[in-house]
Amino acid sequence: MNFVAVNENYKNRTCLKPKDLEKSPFVQFDKWFREAKSLNIIKPNAAFLSSVNGDCQPHSRTVMVKAYDEKGFIFFTECETDKVYQIDKNNNVALLFSWLEIERQVKLTAIAIKLSIKEAFFYFSNRGEQMGCWIEDDGFLSTRALLEKQLGRLLKTLYYKGIEQSDIFCGYRIVPKTAAFWQVCKDKLYQQFTYTKLKNGWEITEN
Ligand SMILES: Cc1cc2nc3c(=O)[nH]c(=O)nc-3n(C[C@H](O)[C@H](O)[C@H](O)COP(=O)(O)O)c2cc1C
C-alpha cells in the first residue's frame, strides 16, 4: 500500500458542498466506502461498535460489517458476549467507521435489531448480489474464516428447520438515527455533515 499517494489524495480533496451530498446516508456511505476500498484502506468494513452496560458504562469493540443496504449495517457475533447482553437490555448503540489513512470517518448513532435466522441466512446467501453491498472478509485470520464457514452451515441448517433464532451466533442490523460524515478537505481544516432521520427522509446539517 502506498501511504504517500493516499495522503496526497486527501490533502488535495475539494470540500463537499451540501448539493454534492446524496439524499440517503446509505448511498453517501456507499460512495465513501467504495472510495476507501479503491484506495486500498486496510479493512474498510471494520467498525467500532459501542454499547452500554447497566451502569451506563460504554463499551467499544471492533466488528466486521458484513453487508449494508437501505435498511442498515449488518454484523455477526457469538451470542454469549457482553455486546449481546448489553444490546438485549439497551439497544442504543454507536458505530464508527474510521478510515485514518484518508482522514475520513462515518459516525452513526443507532439502534441494534437482532436478525431472524431467515434474514441472517438471506444476507449470507446473497453475497455479491444487487440487494446491497456484501463485503467479503479477506480472511486475514484463518480461525475467523473457519468460524464463518461454521456460521454459514449453522444458518442453513436452522433456516431449513424453520428455527427463528440461534443462541450460538447472532446477527444484528444497525439502524442509524444519525449519520455524521467527517473529512479533512482543502479549503477548510475539516468538515462534517450530519444526516438526521425524520419521519419521511433525512435532514442534512453541516456542523
Ligand atoms: C479486526 C477484528 C475484527 C473483529 N470482528 C468481530 C466481529 O465481526 N464480530 C464479533 O463479534 N467480534 C469481532 N471481533 C472481536 C471483538 O472486537 C470483541 O473483542 C469480541 O466480540 C468480544 O466483545 P464483547 O465482549 O464486548 O462482546 C473483532 C476483533 C478484531 C480485532
Image (spheres, rainbow, N blue to C red):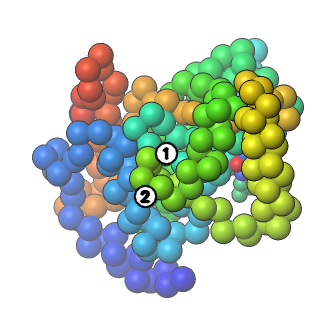
Q: Which residue does the image show at 26% across and 73% down from the upper left?
A: 12
Secondary structure type for disc 1: strand
Residue contact at pointers 1 and 2, CB within 8 angstroms: yes
Q: Name the residue under label 2.
A: 33
Q: In which quarter of the image is residue 184?
A: bottom left
Q: Residues within 10 Å of mark 1 (few under 14, many from 20)?
A: many
Q: Residue, x 33% and y 47% (percent of image)?
A: 27
Q: What element carries label 2?
A: helix
Q: Nearer the viewer, residue 155 or 66?
A: 155
Q: Which of 79 and 85 lies nearest the eye of the viewer?
A: 79
Position of 139 compared to 74: left or right?
A: right
Could you tell me which quadrant the N terminus lies in? bottom right
The disc, 1 or 2, on the residue closer to the chain's N-terminal end is 2
Q: Position of residue 4 (x, y in %)?
A: 44, 83
Locate residue 114 relative to residue 79 in the image: left or right. Answer: left
Disc 2: CA contacts within 10 A as few (<14), some (14-19) or many (>=20)? some
> What's under tag 1, amino acid-wise?
Tyr
Query: In which image quadrant can residue 23 be found?
Result: top left
The quadrant in which the C terminus is found is top left
User: Mark on residue 68?
Assistant: 1
Rendered location of residue 146, percent (x, y): 83, 60
Q: Where is residue 158 in the image (x, y as percent from the top left)?
A: 79, 35
Q: Which x, y percent locates residue 178?
A: 40, 30
